[in-house]
Image (spheres, helix red, strand yellow):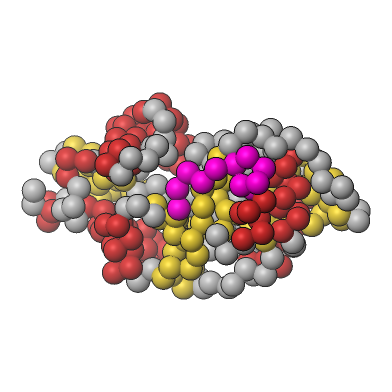
Amino acid sequence: MAIMDLVLRPGTADDAAECGRICYEAFAGIAGEHAFPPDFPSPDVGVAVIEGALTHPGFYSVVAELDGRIVGSNFLDERSTVVGVGPVTVDPGVQNAGVGRRLMRDVMERADERGAPGIRLLQTGYHNRSFSLYVVLGFVHRATVACVQGPPIGRALPGYTVREATDADLGACNDVCRQVHGFDRGGEVADALKQGTARVVERAGRVTGYATDLAFFAHAVGETTPDLQALIAAAPQFAGPGILVPVSDSVLLRWCLSNGLKVVQLMSLMTIGLYNQPDGAYLPSILY
């Protein structure tokens, strides 16, 4: 394959079916090689995820073509000051030929053009090739996170009230996120409010944490670990492969395991540019 003939272009809604197929097959193939369950359980789920990113105004998309055939795609979540990469996928038939590197450089250039202070991504722990690529491109490993899944815990923690978030909570949610991470993720919270998946936890009559959902593609922050425990304990389910728990928060991870959740896989949070050590508790999404 002559990688010099690769053409990169913006993605459109019409690319969803083919890019979604590639997304499913690429992730399923890598997972199968290492005897792990795939992140996307079916081609339909892969198509739905890609279609959502292609049609959302807060996402930048790039599609790779070779001889007029789509061979990969990548995305940049631009809903917040710090941007998140992914999913980046390459057709299994043309992997290890430089397509992924080109797709990554494209979104990195986009982030630079926008003046984004930082770029983040989550990398699958068993995929050594992608880890090596991201290191070469300048990403720094910041944290190991455990993807955990299991039955709902279904109980309330004394002193903590978990409820559905409303539009009036957006400011408080942004305040908590800024306290923990140094910036807010208000665009994602606003989307979760529209979708009806956002939840907040209150302690002593004020909002001390929130979750856009308890899911693979959602994030959560709390002033303390018990704030997140309350959100997790009240969740009706953990959508997708599971929630992402920083291994460094040993109290939270141990609590999850003692309440019936199991580790599915380990992942790496990697960054370029601005990174503040979190001052509080958090669950990243698969994008960051």
The residue shown at (51%, 52%) is: 146
Q: In which quarter of the image is residue 268?
A: bottom left
The answer to whether residue 240 of the structure is visible from this angle is yes
On screen, residue 218 versus residue 86, left or right, reads right
On screen, residue 194 versus residue 82, left or right, reads right
On screen, residue 111 versus residue 31, left or right, reads right
The residue shown at (69%, 65%) is: 280
The magenta segment is 256-266
The residue shown at (50%, 39%) is: 241
Q: Is residue 259 magenta?
A: yes
Q: How many marks?
A: 0
114 shown above or below 205: below
* Residue at the right extreme, as displayed: 205
Depth check: give the residue in front, 201 or 190: 201
* Residue at the front extreme, as displayed: 258
The residue shown at (57%, 64%) is: 248
- Give the image location of residue 220, x and y in percent: 65, 52
- Give the image location of residue 1, x and y in percent: 8, 48
3 shown above or below 44: below
The answer to whether residue 186 of the structure is visible from this angle is no
On screen, residue 280 versus residue 10, left or right, reads right
Depth check: give the residue in front, 23 or 259: 259
Q: In which quarter of the image is residue 131?
A: bottom left
- Give the image location of residue 16, x and y in percent: 36, 33
* Residue at the left extreme, as displayed: 2
- Give the image location of residue 242, x and y in percent: 54, 41
Q: Does the magenta stretch include residue 95?
A: no
171 shown above or below 261: below
